[in-house]
Amino acid sequence: MANQVQLPETLPGDFFVVEWDRLRDRFVLYVDDPDKSSYDLGNDIQVAMRRFSIWGIPDLGNRVLDLAREFGLAQGAPGTNRALPLFKRVSDQPRAQVQFEEDVNHACLPKLH
């Protein structure tokens, strides 16, 4: 459950996560602080985008909000300006095993089998 407190003036830590809670129709912000705080950003995407502008990362915030809306969860890293969708990949296929084989032309490259 998100804290019902005022949003921080700056985003703490190296990253943040935004969740689009489909059941409650709300954005929830999780920050990288010692308390592992979370904040309710509401359901108005324009208001959430404005908040990221105030924090000085409007482009990154917009990308994270878009990814969260599509995948349910997304991570933003202001230091590297990266936005990543977070989702569990489910597959019935076995994972490929990496084996290092000597090859005359590509001795150091791994081969998937």
Image: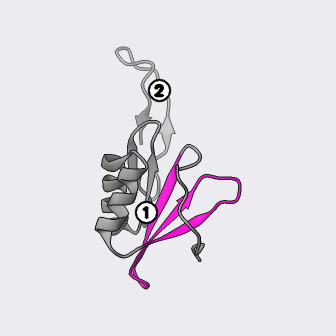
Quick one: which residue is furthest to the bottom in this view?
A: 23
**Between marks 2 and 1 in the image, the one whose residue lies nearer the viewer:** 1
Residue hosting label 1: 89
Quarter the C terminus occupies: top left
Residue 5, image x and y in percent? 59, 70
Callout 2: SS: loop
State whether residue 107 is above or below residue 101: above
Q: Nearer the viewer, residue 105 or 45?
A: 45
Give the amino acid at mark 1: Arg
Question: Residue 87's quadrant in the figure?
Answer: bottom left
Quarter the N terminus occupies: bottom right
Task: Residue at 57%, 73% (x, y): give it.
Answer: 2
Callout 1: SS: loop
Q: Nearer the viewer, residue 71 or 42?
A: 42
The numbered dot on residue 72 is: none
Residue 108, image x and y in percent? 45, 20
Task: Write down the region rendered in magenta.
Answer: 15-41
State whether residue 6 is above or below residue 99: below
Task: Residue at 43%, 18% (x, y): give it.
Answer: 107
The numbered dot on residue 101 is: 2
Question: Residue 6's quadrant in the figure?
Answer: bottom right
